Image (spheres, rainbow, N blue to C red):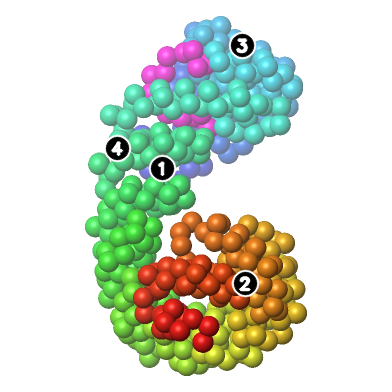
Amino acid sequence: MHGKILEMEQKTEAALDSYSKALKIEPENFPLTLKVARGKLALRQFDEAIKVLEKSTSQPSPPAEIYALLGFAYSSVGNVSKGKSMVERAIEIDPSNILAHQTLAELHIRFGETEIAQGVLDQILAQEFVDYTSLLKLMVFIEDVSKAEAWSPTWTQPRMLEILKRLEDYVSERPLLLVEIADRYWELGQAEKAIALYYEALEQFPSLTSRCRKILAYFLQNNRWEEALELVNRLISLEPDEQLWYVTKADILNQLQRFSEAESALLEAIVKDPEKEAVYLQLARIQFSQGKLDMARDSLRAADEKFKPDFDRTVLSAYIELSAENEILAVQYFEEAEKLGQLRSGQGLNHVFYFQMAVVYEASKNYQKASEALLQSLAIKSNFAEAMNFLGYMWADQNMRLAEARVYIEKALKLEPDNPAFQDSMAWVLYRLGDYAGALLWIEKSRKGMSEADPVILDHLGDIQWKSGQRAEAVAAWKEALTLDPENEVIRKKIEKPGF
């Protein structure tokens, strides 16, 4: 009783000393012998444990556990052969003794006898287990020993799965075991089985948010958006003040193209924590994608009032103004963004940035600046076919640097020979150079390559046909272009006054 009290007070060594004294009085008490021996083994007092256990073997009918522990103790001090004989004696007394088999397997492993050890472990698996703790210990043991190079995953995996399946029978006794089993399935790469068990566990333990996070990451990684949405809504109900869940919900809804709901989720995220800068940008991007330009501006303005100037926000402002055809303002934003990018060692100033900057300059009719931006884009990515074509086409359209324009368009076509837009550019530069026959061949290629009629290509076709003497065909091409772009006054004048 005194030892029990000391043990409850976590005075381990004092408790063990008390139990040892009691054992001298009751040497035939096998449960007490096992308690003392295990205590000494836990303290790595192997020789002391051997003395206690050996004395016990002189008592009538010692249980298998005595020999199993002796086997472990002897093997721990290097006497492997003695340890093996003790373990074999334990199995002889009780063929179903788990500890004995496990210790025997460990001894075979020390001798490098992997296949024999695996056979012993299979014998253990063939036994009936009276409680789940022995199964758990066996699983941990197999997990540890199978890390050795000699152990094949093809042997280990099926045994681990078998143990997990058998552990499921004990869930009613210990519900939290369900979570541990699910964790193990997850580690073994059995994600679907693990998820099913996690959901079952969540019915009993709704606050298992760490597992919810794990499942959510899996759903997101595998584009399982509907399931991810359901789970993130559960997380919001569990942690309603966690801004991350609203942002994640917005990402999912964006993937599902439910933009209005994504916008609402981000507005809620800002309410939860108005100091997270990135959320404002995300909100503005979704608003911009829906054509809500004023709302996107308001979101960016709110961020500008709270935070330092930011490259990404400034670039988005430029795109918004470009979309609104406010070219002058778009240019200002792009130039400001370039300065901000230079302050952060050029981060973000990539080939796409300068290409978009050129689009803005070209729209504002600043062809010199547009040319510089496109050349900068190509300096960053020399095989950027879109930039090559844009530069060549812009120069051809403005009837400038035609020889260079042709070279850039040829380079673009070499990279994408079947691109109808690039073919149109080649037709147009040849038209500017006065090669109408060559231009006609390229414009016909371009027209045939388009999935649907394009007013620009039809307009070019008409111009080239007119110069080639195909007057009726030219007017027909312009008329078709005008039906596609009825507000184009330049094409209308060509039809009304051909050749003007």
Q: Nearer the viewer, residue 446 or 164?
A: 446
Please indicate whether residue 62 sits to the left or right of residue 175 in the image: right
Quadrant housing residue 203: top left
Q: Are marks 1 and 4 in contact (CB under 8 Å)?
A: no
Position of 242 with respect to 28 (left or right) is: left
In the shown orientation, is residue 45 left or right of residue 7? right
Choose between 158 and 176: the one closer to the eye.
158
Residue at coordinates 51% horizontally, 42% vertically from top-left?
Answer: 13
* Residue at the spot of label 3: 88
Q: Which residue is mark 1?
A: 6
Q: Which residue is mark 4?
A: 200
Picture coordinates of residue 465, whole percent (x, y)? 57, 71
Q: Earlier in the sequence, mark 1 or mark 3?
A: 1
**Distance from Cα at disc 3 to Cα at disc 4:** 42 Å
| Above or below: residue 248 compared with residue 352 | above
Please tell me whether residue 136 belongs to the stretch shown in magenta. yes
Whether residue 214 appears in this view of the structure is no
Check if residue 479 falls in the magenta segment: no
- What is the spatial separation of the Cα atoms under label 2 and label 4, in whole angstroms? 76 Å
Q: Nearer the viewer, residue 376 or 340?
A: 376
Cα separation, mark 1 vs mark 4, equals 41 Å
| Mark 1 or 4, nearer chain start | 1
Q: Which residues are magenta?
A: 124-140
Residue type beneath disc 1: Leu
Q: Amino acid at mark 4?
A: Glu
